[in-house]
Image (spheres, rainbow, N blue to C red):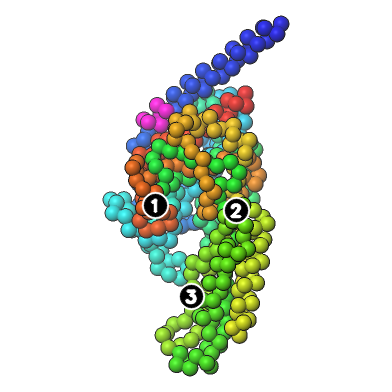
Amino acid sequence: MKRIYFVLLVMISSNVLAQKSNLRTEVSKKALSIEKKVIDWRRDLHEHPELGNTEVRTAGIVAKHLASLGIEVQTGVAKTGVVGILKGGKPGPVVALRADMDGLPVTERVALPFASKVKTTYNGQEVGVMHACGHDTHVAILMGVAEVLASIKKDIPGTVKFIFQPAEEGAPHGEEGGAELMVKEGVLENPKVEVIFGLHINSQTSVGDITYRPGGIMAAVNDLKITVTGRQAHGAYPWSSVDPVVISAQIVNNLQTIVSRNLNVTENPGVVTIGAINGGVRSNIIPEKVEMLGTIRNFTKEDEAMFIERVTTIATKTAEAGGGKAEVKIPYSNHYPVTFNDIPLTEKMLPSLQATAGADHVRLKPPVTGAEDFSFYQEKVPGLFIFLGGMPKGGDPLKAPSHHTPDFFIDESGFTLGVKALSNLALDYMNLKK
């Protein structure tokens, strides 16, 4: 009896492995066949970027494509988001795949025939708009995944939910948006999502490589605003002033002691950055007020609480010491939790990534102090977020232009691996649940 049971188990296991192999072969063939399509989509999106909560054109392209594949489409989710639901030919779990759609207020400097020439007004300043973080790539890849999986719909043991999300970089000040709003509006329900997968292109990781990390892979983020108020005076008579410019300079320097003296750097990294200082209108007038914008990054709730307390104390007390006042707002407009890869899920799906890219091309990644609102989905369901190589082979990661810069560049030859990786993660997870 035991022998019969064992033989049945072997037969079932062999059938599952054979089915997975056949599906992976189909995915690979289809992904290669639409490579040019994916690249063309990406180039079009790159040339026409849109900021968070304004991705109307992008959403229209996505919705039209999903509908053409026979996928059920929902639009207007979290303002401009698009959700597609593909019900497979066999029963099984609901797996979500996510791509973000928004660009950044960055003026492109890369000499590409499809470089962005879009201009807009952001925070009162005229700026260019650019896909300087690769979200155009994410959208094009997920559009490709939708086409691949729709072509083998009858063989899919479950349902795939495609989430095209606006405003990952943060909604405009005073607005809601991004993954947090999508979750609030029920994107993980009806049908209820069991797990979610996502990827991010990386300009400093070689094409053909995938990197991952169990647990905290990207930091929690809080943005901040510090308003320093002093007393205005003529620049020739500084003794008549309480100078908010000098106080602000001291605050910036003092904030750096949080990482160097308050954070246990042997356990987790952390960052305090002031990215904008605005005050004054003329060389010989000491202004009354200076405003600073910045960001803090952490990997634990305890470190986050410590950073918030120390930033607030340092800013207010430094201002008092200079005779002025400082008002601190944390978060000022947005907060993202830690992007936390579910550890059992990561372990379970690692063979899928290795089979797709080759074991030598799947590498463990150190923590990233950048942040991702994919974390809001991971607070509700187990999730796995990976990085896809976009640097030309042989490139130097230290010299490759980083994300959020005017020279950001992505090698398009890595897109097909992204299509295969997301497709296989969804299919392999479903087959593991059978």
**Residue drawn where x is 48% and y is 38% of the image:** 363
Q: Is residue 199 visible?
A: no
**Residue drawn where x is 40% and y is 37% of the image:** 208
Question: Does dot 2 land on a helix, a strand or a loop?
Answer: loop
Direction from residue 374 to residue 204 in the image, left or right? left
Residue at label 3? 278
Q: Quadrant of residue 189?
A: top right
Q: Residues within 10 Å of mark 3 (few under 14, many from 20)?
A: few
Residue at label 2? 266
Picture coordinates of residue 232 (x, y %)? 52, 88
From the viewer's side, name the closer residue of 257 and 73.
257
Q: Earlier in the sequence, mark 1 or mark 2?
A: 2
Question: Does dot 1 land on a helix, a strand or a loop?
Answer: loop
Direction from residue 136 to residue 337 in the image, left or right? right
Q: Quadrant of residue 381?
A: top right
Q: Residues within 10 Å of mark 2 (few under 14, many from 20)?
A: few
Picture coordinates of residue 150 (x, y %)? 48, 30
Check if residue 30 falls in the magenta segment: yes
The amino acid on which the numbered mark 2 sits, given as a three-letter code, is Thr
The residue range painted magenta reads 28-33
Q: Residues within 10 Å of mark 1 (few under 14, many from 20)?
A: few
| Structural distance between the alpha carbons of marks 1 and 2 | 24 Å
Residue at label 1? 398
